[in-house]
Amino acid sequence: MSARFTSWRWHAIAISVSTLYLSALAQGSSENNFAANFSDTPQPFTLNVDRDFIAVTKLKASLTRYTKNINVTDFSEGPPQHNVSTIRDYWVNNYTWSEEEASINRQFRQFTTTVHAGPNYTYPIPLHFVHHRSDRADAIPLLFLHGWPGSFLEVGKIIEPLVNPPNSSVTAFHVVAPSLPGFGFSPAPEQPSLGLRQTGQGCNDLMMQLGYTKYVIQGGDLGAFTLRFMAVDFPSSVRAIHTNFWWSAPTPADRAANQAGNNTAEERAYIEALDWYANNGNGYQQIQQKAPLQLAVALTDSPVGFAIWIYQLMQTISDMYPWTPREIITWAMMYYIQGPYGGFRTYRELTHPGETVWLEEWGYISQPVGISNFGKQILLAPLPWAQRKGNVVYFQYHDRGGHFASHEVPDLLVGDIRAFLALGTVASQAYLKED
């Protein structure tokens, strides 16, 4: 390739980038890059992302600069270069955002509103959410809370069987699935101190706006922490909780017993998993907690870089799930469209005194608790330890599935939710109980 040709090629690229940016500025596109109105009451929402932003994103993907390939073939240092190039090439040559956008709009009934938290966070919280109502008069309202690096898309494979079960003997649900603030299409907070407890307060306000004065919650990852705060803060409204991620910190006595070999195989495996995570698996958590802005400056400008950032974790903690380039890119877009900073710094908010989730600072949960453990979920708290912090009435282990249960093994998760809240169970009775 001649130097003259190269010069003209990059000159053309520069003109393309400038034209796209000037067009976006001329049209006054939203800083979040999607059209939305957040009023004081729920309003229908149709996803419509700025097309100039999409064009610039694809152009940036095409300009991805690869790292030097040093023959590290596994994921020990991050996704290998062939994974990166595969995602980049698919993004440039095959991925069409308009098709994804249309698919999301067809699949989900979406809404926006503004909610409010408690006295520790007094700013309004704009919220995007999915809301599917069952035709069944006896349906139970279920709040679905996602985590990192997921989004409201995680509810996609379970929403239909929950809302429309096969017959009247199977429990039906009204499903509400918000985007956590800074995720998906809920704009990131512009003030600090919106932690998971305050997010839970906002989610309870959402359920009140929808007329659900009593409800149950299902959640994993950050959602699993949020629902535990909510169960403690709103005991009359939150009637039962189900989770596929129950964190339970071992006590010094547990550690001593492990050293002496006086614990069960399950307890030993759990401690080993915790130690592995602390020493090898939580690098993303540490930087998102300690320097989220520094990370965001780089990854806000690199769509492929951000996709690879979350793909590393997606691949590591799922159960050999065959992630496709299309899925990886679309999951990444749930952050990249508005910018990933808000999602990153959620981890910084986990460190507030009295709200440190790793220290289990949410108290004992007296409502019925259901726990589903999936084989590749790296943190599987033993039942006796889980019972220290909650009234566990349902505990199910599956030998397949990973961290993203609703996406990887939706049939198993739906089955557990139905079993936990089947008519006549402790959880069902707690929901039906009159105040």
Image: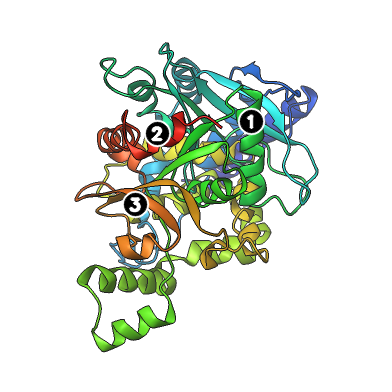
Query: Considering only vertical position in the picture, is 189 above or below 289?
Result: above
The answer for how far apart the CA atoms under marks 2 and 1 are is 24 Å
Q: Which residue is mark 2?
A: 429
Q: Contact, CB < 8 Å: mark 2 with mark 1?
A: no
What residue appears at the point 57 percent right and 58 percent down from the top-left corner? 362
On the image, the x and y values in percent for residue 359 come to: 54, 68
Determine the residue located farthest toward the top in the rendered image.
135
Q: Contact, CB < 8 Å: mark 1 with mark 3?
A: no
On the image, the x and y values in percent for residue 5 come to: 54, 41
Decide: few, some or many residues near mark 2? Use Cα within 10 Å; few <14, some 14-19, many ≥20: some
If you read the primary sequence from the N terminus, does the residue marked by circle 3 or circle 2 appear first? 3
What residue appears at the point 35 percent right and 86 percent down from the top-left corner? 256
Quadrant for the C terminus in the image: top right
Decide: few, some or many residues near mark 1? Use Cα within 10 Å; few <14, some 14-19, many ≥20: many
Q: Which residue is mark 3?
A: 315
Which of discs 3 and 2 lies nearer the camera? The answer is: 2
Q: Is residue 32 visible?
A: no
Q: Which residue is mark 1?
A: 206
Q: Secondary structure at mark 2?
A: helix
On the image, the x and y values in percent for residue 137 come to: 44, 13
The answer for how far apart the CA atoms under marks 3 and 2 are is 39 Å
Q: On the picture, is 237 further left or further right than 245?
A: right
